Image: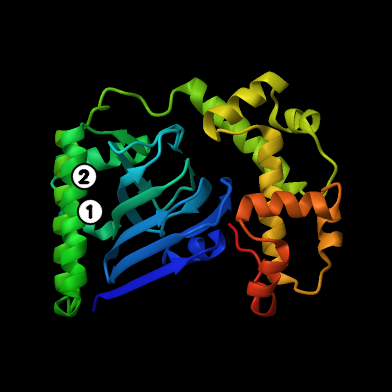
């Protein structure tokens, strides 16, 4: 039987945990109070989903195993990037449950889509199934404006109808029929407006620049409590200072130094939620901030609240950080 879940959150970790079936790790990059929402219509053979957030984020996530997911933006800010390519209103995201993905949103982002169990792919015509296999390797497909608009409208209509008629989706056969029809219609519309059928996957040079960013970020995350700077990050990323700067500006719209500070602030927020008894001065020192006042100023800029407010909101019942 289908079920509807809906949640609102004011914290990126809570948002990451709200999407059932996905393994997600979010880091807030944009300053200001976070607001997010997640809606899902859960069924035996998959689910319909919608997720909205209001701040610049880096999302690292793995879709449900043995599922294929397709999603399009209802709203997206210029400068957002998914799988090494610009994420635009004309983008179709095609996700396999066997991979991990990176998405950097550059402000407000609203996505709608569906995830279906691989068994449902057998309901597709052979040419459609072959197109979908190719699309999974592309990850981020550019569509024509008309095709993207048609997919958005169709998914919104299906989602809203499922919300209104949730009780009528009473058995697995009805669930499967709805998801199969939605998958087929999405693929048909995408195939008709596939603007990148002759394009390769991520161009080799762009893929190399993405690897520089990943190596740098992995090194930063592993050394949040160490005294590291740009020279050490360059060595770990196998890149010159100039190349590192360029790659971060291209994919993350920030500098390596600012990104390291954002990582440390996100880690500080998780620590405050998990360990109510730790003095803020001690936490600031552990994470490389010059002083408690320096830490507090940047924390307030990032999350629009003081560290003491986070302690008050989460300290007594903090669940700690989450991650892949």
Q: In this picture, is 265 found above or below 259?
A: below
The answer for how far apart the CA atoms under marks 1 and 2 are is 7 Å
| Residue that badge 2 annotates | 129
> Residue drawn at (77%, 46%), measured in percent from left and top?
223
Q: Identify the image quadrant of residue 260.
A: top right
Q: Are marks 1 and 2 in contact (CB under 8 Å)?
A: yes
Position of 173 relative to 178 (above/below): below
Where residue 274 appears, as percent x and y from the top left, is 70, 70
Q: Give the image location of residue 141, x and y in percent.
A: 31, 35
Residue 98 vs 232, above or below: the answer is below
Query: Does the rendering let one see residue 126?
Result: no
Taking depth in this image into account, of 176 and 216 the one nearest to the observer is 216
Q: Is 36 left, or right, of 180 in this rendering?
A: right
Q: Position of residue 143 (x, y in %)?
A: 24, 33
Q: In terms of image quadrants, where is residue 22?
A: bottom left
Q: Quadrant of the C terminus?
A: bottom right
As helix, strand or loop, the secondary structure at mark 2 comes to: helix
Res 77 seen here: yes
Under tag 1, what secondary structure? helix
Q: Name the residue under label 1.
A: 121
Tell me, what colour scheme is on the image?
A: rainbow
Q: Quadrant of the N terminus?
A: bottom left
Is residue 95 shown left or right of residue 153?
Answer: right
Q: How crowded is mark 1: few (under 14 residues within 10 Å), some or many (20 or more)?
A: some
Viewer-side residue, 315 vs 186: 315
Q: In this view, does 258 lie to the left or right of 125?
A: right
Rendered residue at 34%/73% (across/down): 5
User: Total of numbered circles in the picture?
Assistant: 2
């Amino acid at each position: 039987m289908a079920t509807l879940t809906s949640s609102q959150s004011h914290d990126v970790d809570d948002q990451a945990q709200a999407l059932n079936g996905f393994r997600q790790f979010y880091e807030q990059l944009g300053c200001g109070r976070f607001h997010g929402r997640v809606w899902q219509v859960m069924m035996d053979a998959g689910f319909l989903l919608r997720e909205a957030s209001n701040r610049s984020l880096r999302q690292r996530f793995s879709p449900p195993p043995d599922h294929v997911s397709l999603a399009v933006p209802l709203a997206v800010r210029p400068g957002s990037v998914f799988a090494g390519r610009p994420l635009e209103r004309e983008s179709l995201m095609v996700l396999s449950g066997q991979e991990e993905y990176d998405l950097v949103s550059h402000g407000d982002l609203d996505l709608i889509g569906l995830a279906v169990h691989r068994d449902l792919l057998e309901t597709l015509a052979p040419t459609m199934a072959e197109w979908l296999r190719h699309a999974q390797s592309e990850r981020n497909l550019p569509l024509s404006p008309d095709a993207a608009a048609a997919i958005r409208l169709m998914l919104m209509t299906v989602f809203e109808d499922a919300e209104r008629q949730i009780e009528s989706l009473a058995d697995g056969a009805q669930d499967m029929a709805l998801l199969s029809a939605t998958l087929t219609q999405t693929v048909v519309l995408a195939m008709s407006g596939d603007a990148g059928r002759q394009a390769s996957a991520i161009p080799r040079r762009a893929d190399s620049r993405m690897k520089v960013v990943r190596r740098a970020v992995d090194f930063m995350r592993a050394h949040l409590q160490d005294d590291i700077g740009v020279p050490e990050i360059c060595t770990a990323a196998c890149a010159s200072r100039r190349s590192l700067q360029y790659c971060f500006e291209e994919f993350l719209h920030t500098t390596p130094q600012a990104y390291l500070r954002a990582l440390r602030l996100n880690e500080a927020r998780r620590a405050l939620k998990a360990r109510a008894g730790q003095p803020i001065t001690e936490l600031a020192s552990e994470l490389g901030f010059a002083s408690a006042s320096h830490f507090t100023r940047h924390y307030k800029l990032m999350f629009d609240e003081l560290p003491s407010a986070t302690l008050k909101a989460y300290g007594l019942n903090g669940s700690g950080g989450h991650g892949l």
